[in-house]
Amino acid sequence: MGSDFNDLAAYRLARALARDVYRSVGQWPAFDRATIGEQVVRAADSVPANIAEATGRWTKADRRRFLIVARSSLLETEHWLNTAWERGLLKSNPSERVAEVARTLNGLIKRPGPK
């Protein structure tokens, strides 16, 4: 069974963001990891997972629904990353990376593929 989602720019960008979020959170103090860290890792991991799940759906409507869930998780990720940035937990502002994932994900939502 082939995995078409690996070829999607939105998936690759979301996966890279989730990986970097995980690595960053691992370096935070214990209190911050246990509060904001767990939330942001879960939200960030959900984005590429839902993109992958969307590619396995049979209808455009079903694919679009999972892509919209991915976008919702991306917005939650953005919230937590902004909070982490404001609290001095991140070395760089994450807004451009989140915007890049959002642009590619919105493209998929507009054109969720054949069927």
Image (spheres, rainbow, N blue to C red):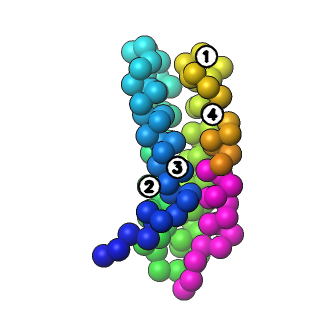
What number is the disc on residue 20? none
Kindly report which numbered mark, 1 or 3, lies closer to the viewer in this rendering.
Answer: 3
Kindly report which numbered mark, 2 or 3, lies closer to the viewer in this rendering.
Answer: 3
Residue corresponding to mark 3? 14
The Cα–Cα distance between marks 1 and 4, rounded to whole angstroms, is: 13 Å
Residue corresponding to mark 4? 94
First-in-chain label (4 vs 2): 2
x, y percentage for residue 22?
42, 34
Image vertical order of residue 72 relative to residue 113, above or below? above
Residue corresponding to mark 2? 49
Which residue type does callout 4 highlight? Pro
The Cα–Cα distance between marks 3 and 4, rounded to whole angstroms, is: 13 Å
Quick check: can you spot residue 17? yes
Q: Residues within 10 Å of mark 1 (few under 14, many from 20)?
A: few
Residue 25 located within the stretch drawn in magenta:
no
State the quadrant of the N terminus: bottom left
Residue corresponding to mark 1? 87
Residue at left 48%, top 45%?
16
First-in-chain label (1 vs 4): 1
For residue 3, side relative to residue 99 (left or right): left
x, y percentage for residue 89?
55, 19
